[in-house]
Amino acid sequence: MVDYAAIQHKIDVGLGKAGAKLGQPYTGYRITSAASGDFPSGWTVQETGVPIFRRRVSITALEDAFQYGGGIWYDLIGDMEPFLLGDVFLSTDPAYDPGVSYGAGAQQVVGSTYELNGFAFAWHAPVQTPIGGRIDRRGQIFRAPETPTTYGTGGDGSTSWRQAMDAANPLVLASGAFAFVDRALNMPASFVPLGISAISRPPRGENFKPDVPGMPGLPRYFAYLPYLPGYEAASGDRIETEDGARYVVVDPYRQEQGVTGSQLALERMIDQAA
């Protein structure tokens, strides 16, 4: 009988040796029972200076049932044996210095930016190269309450779904788990890591005419989120990124085996701030 675990261990060790020669340094973060608040400051640091070389791979090579996803995926050339699916890695390579480092000035612009250079650990199957999903920014997630809002003092006691939509509840990380919290508690939504890719701005077609002649359709985007304990994306969830852009989830898909995490089709409702 083939000892696949022993073989994968050797593969991981070999990838670690290659990563030590070719890889850039990363810091790995994990959601533990002590994790609360925003990524990355509220997550637990697992290891620093992890050398990993990432190489883009086609989605057709992955165990992924979301056929029309727009995410970016990587082969991870490094020793991923100490890490778990859902761990998130951010590059810590210093600013560009020829022959020394390849951070700002080589892989991202110099100066302030909301974008991140990282990935989430998504797949570690036997006799396979580990897989990561691109992470390039942070966002906050909101969901409308499940019951309509009741008008209180000064009102007539009636309920309104519109008021409920305007009072969406924030997703908050506390003690290692995510949950939606009543907006009345005035708790800020926790920032989570995600990767966003543009898909298209599809025409309305014959069945759905524009409201105004020549009006373009809503731009479509794709988002990848690592596994977030306690959160399962739903249609209608709203995502707001740090640059002020706002998206609505129209097609959520989540995998807890194979390539793990949430893959979301989005419509962008508000562009980023100028």
Image: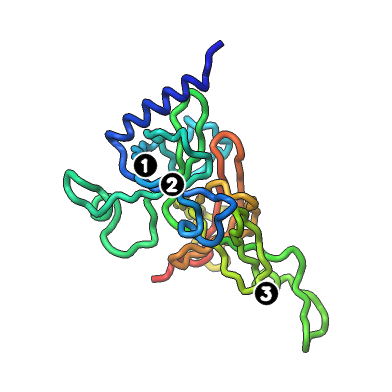
From the image, tell me which residue sits under label 1: 50
Q: Amino acid at mark 1?
A: Val
- Secondary structure, mark 3, is helix
Disc assigned to residue 27: none
For the residues bearing labels 2 and 3, Cβ distance under 8 angstroms:
no
| Residue identified by numbered label 3 | 184
Pick whichever of labels 1 and 3 is earlier in the sequence.
1
x, y (%) of residue 11?
42, 24
Rendered location of residue 16, percent (x, y): 36, 31
Left or right for 73, reference 225: left
Vertical arrangement, residue 193 with respect to residue 261, above or below: below
- Residue at 38% over, 47% down: 48
Give the farthest residue toward the bottom. 154
Please state, as top left, top right, bottom left or bottom right, where the C terminus lies in the image.
Answer: bottom left
Residue 217 visible in this rendered orientation of the protein: no
Q: Nearer the viewer, residue 50 or 244?
A: 50
Q: How many marks?
A: 3
Say left or right for 190 vs 114.
right
Q: Indicate the secondary structure of the residue bearing disc 2.
A: strand
Q: Are marks 2 and 1 in contact (CB under 8 Å)?
A: yes
- Marks 2 and 3, how far apart at CA: 34 Å
- The mark nearer the N terminus, 2 or 3, is 2
Q: Residues within 10 Å of mark 2 (few under 14, many from 20)?
A: many
The one nearer the camera, 63 or 12, is 12
N-term-proximal mark, 2 vs 1 = 2
Give the residue type that dot 3 points to.
Ala
Residue 28 tag number: 2
Foreground residue, 5 or 137? 5
